[in-house]
Image: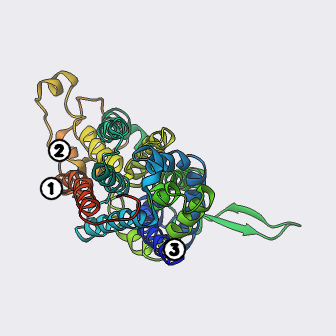
Amino acid sequence: MVSLLLLVALLAAIFVGFNIGGSSTGVAWGPPVGARITNKTVAAALMTFFVFLGGWTVGRNVIDTLGGDLVPRALFSTEASIVVLGFIGLGMLFANLYGVPVSTSMTAVGAIAGLGLATGRLDYSVVGSIMVWWVIAPILGFWFGAVIGRYLYPYLDQKFALQQSSGPLVTLDRSGLLPTLRMGPGTARRELVSTVVVLVIACYMAFSAGASNVANAVAPLVGGGAIGVDSAVILGTVAIGLGAFTIARRTMESVGNDLTDLPLLAATIVMVVAASITTVASALGVPISLALSTVMCIVGLGWGRATRPTGAADLVRGEVEAEISVNAVTAETGEAVPEVGEEDPENVQDVQQLFDPSSVVRFVAFWVIGPSVATVLSYATFVLLPVPGTV
């Protein structure tokens, strides 16, 4: 019976990791795949490798937090771990049905917190420090995006915007003794450098996803001593990789966070900011949502770009000349970049529709509702049912 319960717990962890792979791969690799820089199979392989690196290094800190700091390790019996992982998986499924970038980390914290509340052994100081980061992360994402959008984005767009040629990026020259790589016909050096940068950043995004999300699939099992940390990281990586090679093929096309519709430069900026915030938090052992910082950075980048026609003094007074819209990042830069406060307001108004403002409200609502529902349901389950190890 024990071995059967352990098998069920491992399958629950694989289910959670599988869904994480489907969601996170789209966020990290949607822009490069959409821009035809790489294909889905290569993207899935790179995602799996860098998720493993993130989980094996920085991700151990998050496993410690979820698997032993929020509640005592003794509470994670195999049965309790199955219940917690079940609520994490259901939370992801519920959010995915509504097309919302799901916060696996926040749902995981909610499910584990419900266990701690039901048994009276929740460490409130740890919960408090985690929730402080949940407030800080989207604020940082927004303001990093806003500053870049207002003061740097047009210059970056002018110098580094990726212009793709129609032919292959590189070719293999077999005329010499050894085959060598050469730039393809029509490939400019700028295009080659920009492409490599985008790929490196996507790998960095995958690393941050592993650092944050591997723990969500395996922390309860590690906390209860069902498997060791090394085995857990490998299990989580395999599950996430399975999702990357299967269901992520669709999410890399649609990309749940609307990154596909962004200019590739804007998507790259968002990826760097969101991945950096997530990696730093993970290094501190804080479970945090990659989607949280990603979406708010998109909003901030668009807000900053849209306020460029307004001077600093008028902006402080709220006298904004242009319509504030995330869609402003699609505005054309032109050959010369006007100074802040001197740009034509019409340049950032008649642009491609990227982001429905109501989506932001829906995202934020689910960031509150998701972990709250997970906490309530987990608490009710452990109070009403005699789960071994918690009574």
Colour convention: rainbow
Image quadrant holding the C terminus, namely bottom left
Residue at 73% across, 68% down:
172
The mark closer to the camera, 1 or 3, is 3
Q: Where in the figure is residue 228, as x and y percent of width and height?
A: 60, 58
Residue kind at label 3, given as amino acid type: Val
Disc number placed over residue 358 in the picture, else none = 1
Q: Helix, strand, or loop for circle 1?
A: helix
- Residue denoted by label 2: 346
Badge number at residue 2: 3
Q: Answer whether residue 332 is visible to the viewer in this image.
A: no
Q: Quadrant of residue 344?
A: top left
Mark 3 lies on a secondary structure that is: helix
Q: Distance between the Cα atoms at labels 2 and 3?
A: 67 Å
Q: Earlier in the sequence, mark 2 or mark 1?
A: 2
Label 2 crowd (10 A; few <14 / some 14-19 / many >=20): few
**From the viewer's perspective, is 45 left or right of 148?**
right
Query: How far, Cα to Cα, is label 2 from label 1?
Result: 23 Å
